[in-house]
Amino acid sequence: MRLNDLQPSRRARAKRVGRGIGSGLGKTCGRGHKGQKSRSGGFHKLGFEGGQMPLQRRLPKVGFRSRKSMDADEIRTSELNKVTADTIDLGALREAGLIGRTVSRVKVVLAGPINKPLRLKGLAITKGARAAIDAAGGSVED
């Protein structure tokens, strides 16, 4: 698309109803005969099915989203290599951009290599990740 291709969008003309039989929208103005939809102000709620049990109530409810997941996060061992601080805690992970500001609990999981000795403080950690950090010469404080 180029600037010389731009043109105003085509808008449909407003329906001019009630202007005689020749317009095609005279007398009932395209609303048909009788019934709720033909009357002014005749409308029903979205999803209303005339008193029948509506679809959104007939179908089973599925899924669940834990509120705990909003303030918890996981960090891979390979991501810990990006942190430059001496002691890795929540503040250091935030500064490195690895966790969001609402996160209050972090768990370190084993995924990827560890290139340097790390010192972790105040973080949950899996057995495998703890073993990998110890093997790299690091330490974990609970």
Image (cartoon, grey):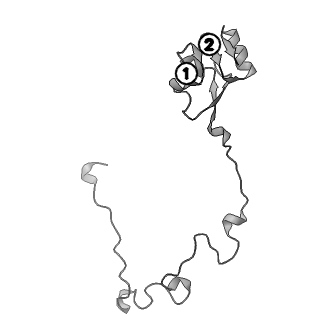
Question: Residue at left 71%, top 57%?
Answer: 61
Return the disc, 1 or 2, that comes first in the chain's sequence.
1
How far across and how far down the image is residue 100, in percent?
55, 32
Question: Residue at left 67%, top 67%?
Answer: 55
Q: Residue at label 1?
A: 92
Q: Is residue 13 left or right of residue 36?
A: left
Can you say which quadrant of the picture contains the C terminus? top right
How far across and how far down the image is residue 135, in percent?
70, 9
Q: Is residue 42 above or below residue 61?
A: below
Question: Residue at left 73%, top 14%?
Answer: 131
How far across and how far down the image is residue 129, in percent?
70, 19
Q: Residue at label 2?
A: 118
The single residue placed furthest to the left in the displayed view is 4
Question: Residue at left 56%, top 87%?
Answer: 35
What kind of residue is marked 1?
A: Ala
Q: Is residue 113 left or right of residue 41?
A: right
